[in-house]
Image: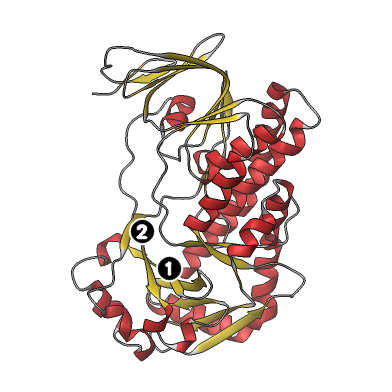
Amino acid sequence: MWRQDNTALTKDLPVMTNTVTSPIVVLGRGIAGLSAAIALGSAGYPVHLIGRPPATPGGLQLSPNGFRALSSLGLDKAILDKADRLNAVVIKALSTNRHLTEIIHDPKHLHAAVSRQDVMDCLVAKAETLSCIRFTDTEIHTVQLGTEKATLVSVDGDIFSADEVIGADGPKGLACAALTGQNSMPPQPAYRAMRAEIEAAKLPTAFRRPLTLLMLGDGCHMVSYPIKGGSHINLVFCTSADKVTIGWQQRCFSLNPLLSNLTDPAISWANTPLYPAEVLPVWRRAHLTLLGDSAHVMPPHLAQGAGQTFVDAACLKVLLAEKPLAQALDQMAATRSIEVQAITKKAAASGQIMRLGGIASQARNIFIDIAGPHFMNSWLDEVWQAEN
């Protein structure tokens, strides 16, 4: 059983073995952890990156603000080489395939989709070029914030001591729980994202175009875009958890001939929770600083999930060139905890609009059709073009 006091999250511990001391430990080896390690390592700080490499199926979208952050981190060219440029967002009605509106991207502004594994490969390759970054493949199950140092204990009993810890192990990870003082699991969210990666050749031509396809339904919506050089299509279908029961594909997709292929039982759909949007008011306490989705839960409705994590890391890198480590972490936490709030609120509002049901969903589609691309572009461009 887990137990908690004012400074530690822990469970019954095995016999202690090795002790490793590092100036900085980054907890989490996903996109956020690697990005943070690259920002710190690029500034010359020794970094110990600890955690299990996560599974990385599917893809993600990046908009201009995300690419500006990647440029600051020296990652834009590598990731763009793996990405599929997107030239528009096409919005349709999910049940009837009726065209509602289309937003054409300015060619001067980068919008692209890329597989998560390709992003991870680029991040790992960059981190491996920085000799001050070391990796340890283990699971941490205790985070303790002492008066002078932070201490982490692995499942093998190894102890890692650090002057600073960057928490990048996700919104339900140990770092977030240690900072907020909460270690109970939240109730399962009311909405789910069903994710699938399908060979492009198995889908109609409409899915293979270099664009984001957004299909709005009754209490649900689906987003698709090409990845891996157009050879695969990433699909994300969002709906309420109570609709994801046996036969949900047939009920949700069979009315639209364009989507009939998606009822194939051979397609593997990953059922993932959509946690409510949240930005923690405090990202830094004692020797612990949160970054990425450990600090802000970003709904996947404005192509900002990974992008805002890159903005966090880019902000830190800029500050490290100007200030000592502790001051840079203080200012990053203070600055980004404010900046990201508006984007998170807009992403949450977009999700509420997309999941409207019944008559409200019909009114939404009519409004989008009448309002046209100018309104939609102004709503989205404020986020996509946001200065870092």
Residue 25 coordinates in the image, percent (x, y): 54, 25
Q: In the rendered structure, which amino acid carries the disc numbered 1? A: Arg
Q: Does residue 332 sit above or below 249 in this rendering? A: above
The residue wearing badge 1 is 355
Q: Verify CB contact (< 8 Å) between mark 1 and mark 2.
A: yes
The residue wearing badge 2 is 191
Residue 166 coordinates in the image, percent (x, y): 55, 30
Q: Residues within 10 Å of mark 2 (few under 14, many from 20)?
A: many
**Quick one: 38 or 387, which is closer to the camera?**
38
Residue 321 badge:
none
**Quick one: 223 or 207, which is closer to the camera?**
207
Q: Secondary structure at mark 2?
A: strand
The residue lying at 40 percent from left, 54 percent from top is 274
The residue lying at 79 percent from left, 32 percent from top is 321
Q: Secondary structure at mark 1?
A: loop
Q: In the rendered structure, which amino acid carries the disc numbered 2? A: Tyr
